Amino acid sequence: MHISKKAQLISPSPTLALDAKAKAMAAEGIDVISFGVGEPDFDTPVNIREAAIAAINAGFTRYTATPGIDDLRRAVCVRLKANFDQEYQPNQIVVSNGAKHSLYNAFTVLVDEGDEVILPTPCWVSYTELIKLCGGIPVFVHATEENDFLMTPEEFMAAITPKTRVLCLNSPSNPTGGVYSAADLQAIAAICVQHNIYVIADEIYAQLLYDGRTYTSISSFGQEIKDLTIIINGVSKSYAMTGWRIGYSASHPVLAKAMGDVQSHVTSNPNSIAQKAAIEALNGPQESIEAMRVEFEKRRNKMVELINAIPGFSARTPGGAFYVFANVANLFGKTLRGVKIEGSTALADVILKEVNVAVVPGFAFERDEFMRFSYATSMEKIIAGLERIAKLIAEAE
């Protein structure tokens, strides 16, 4: 069988593979606790579900405009203004089949064969593969744990070459929960303007901030950086709508048109019913977001406390999203139930096999000495899962 060279370069998503394995085990009756996939455990709010049912009953089940219906694109503009004081017009919005699809559109219109994309690590698993799929070259900047895994302006500047085309910036971060300060973003923005570097700003977790933080977008530091920025967001994380697959981008009209043209040939419009539900999410009551955020903050605090109580584990307190990125390097070289721990993948495999807890190895995020724990699950499961891990790790020799 012939498989294209591009397809052969792509690795499957480790997080989705882990989630599939955990679900298969659960289907066999095994009591699995998953700290794997990044998916809120809350139900989609009732008003949003009712809007989808109303759309079905009204027969809103046909093709729509490729970049999304006008009402939804206007709702995105209203929400961007209300939440982040960012001014966009409907012709600058492209609604896609999830934020991952929006990212694919953005990389496709910005990256030519051989272009370099600067990617701070640890980074979400799909960025690297999307860059390669578009013919680009990921250039990793290894941000330090001491700096909360955030790339400094100096580190960014040092990574720039004549081939640099794009900076991919994720704040709050998956997998670390790190949140860039306004001062660092302003400095990074100035460098991008100076060197004419585009920014793909993944802001999907922007409404999940803790400890009184407020969100700042890199696009907010003047018209020049705004013109160079493609904002990526969606309804999945904030409104517990992961399966509805509605993401969107906000950008310069020329970039938006190009992304809409690409999408018209790849998928056409996003799901018509989910678009109606997304309008209700964006225009309707917003209290559910704060309720989830408050609960996530409580879970974060407990998870960080319990992880730091496990010998060989250490974790910083994340500022946003719903992940803890724990350092497990002190366990490397030790043996656990007959298995020598030579990296995060081996450790994750032992934990899943021996105590039925799913954790994503840091290797998936370009940092092997760490593991990602998602606290998008109940407090009871957080306590029970980490108790299982603690008892297992106590056996390490």
Image (cartoon, grey):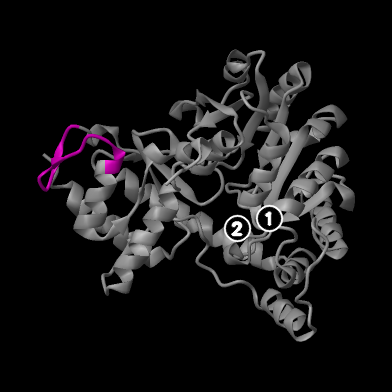
Percent position (x, y) of residue 285?
75, 69
Residue drawn 66% across and 58% down?
A: 97
Alpha carbon of mark 2 to alpha carbon of mark 1: how far? 8 Å
Most foreground residue, 20 or 10:
10
Where is mark 1, residue-wise?
234
What kind of element bears circle 1? strand
Q: Is residue 336 magenta?
A: yes
> Residue 246 lies in what quarter of the image?
bottom right
Q: Is residue 302 left or right of residue 125?
A: left
Write down the region rendered in magenta: 333-345
In the depicted structure, whether residue 39 falls above or below residue 121: below
What kind of element bears circle 2? loop
Q: Is residue 334 left or right of residue 319?
A: left
Q: Residues within 10 Å of mark 1 (few under 14, many from 20)?
A: many
Task: Determine which of the numbered discs, if any, sits on residue 293 in the image.
Answer: none
Q: Residues within 10 Å of mark 2 (few under 14, many from 20)?
A: many
Image marks 2 and 1: residues in contact by CB distance under 8 Å: yes
Percent position (x, y) of residue 30?
26, 70
> Residue 70 lies in what quarter of the image?
bottom right
Q: Is residue 310 left or right of residue 192?
A: left
Percent position (x, y) of residue 181?
65, 32
Residue drawn 75% across and 55% down?
A: 95
Where is mark 2, residue-wise?
237
Q: Is residue 334 magenta?
A: yes
Can residue 343 be seen in this snapshot? yes
Can residue 150 be seen in this snapshot? no
